[in-house]
Image (cartoon, helix red, strand yellow):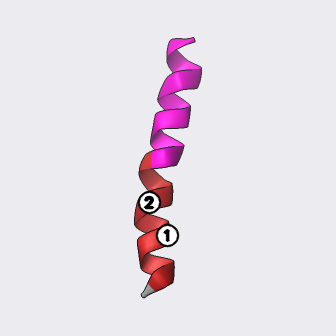
Amino acid sequence: MKGIILWLMGVPLIVIILLYMFVF
């Protein structure tokens, strides 16, 4: 259960980082 929560938290984090790199 904890792994699923970490995965769900981690995926948006990766998306935000990729968007940050794309914008800047």
- Residue 1 coordinates in the image, percent (x, y): 42, 88
- Contact between marks 1 and 2 (CB within 8 A): the answer is yes
Q: Is residue 17 above or below residue 2?
A: above
Q: Is residue 5 above or below residue 1?
A: above
Amino acid on which the number 1 mark rests in the picture: Leu
Q: Is disc 1 placed on a helix, strand or loop?
A: helix
Amino acid on which the number 2 mark rests in the picture: Met
Q: Main secondary structure of the magenta part?
A: helix
Q: Tell me which residue sits at (53%, 24%) in the image.
A: 20
Q: Tell me which residue sits at (50%, 57%) in the image.
A: 10
Q: Is residue 2 above or below residue 15?
A: below
Image check: 10 left or right of 5? right
Q: Which mark is residue 20?
A: none
Q: Tell me which residue sits at (44%, 60%) in the image.
A: 9
Q: Which residue position is annotated with label 1?
A: 6
Q: Which residue position is annotated with label 2?
A: 9
Q: Nearer the viewer, residue 5 or 18?
A: 5
Q: Is disc 2 placed on a helix, strand or loop?
A: helix
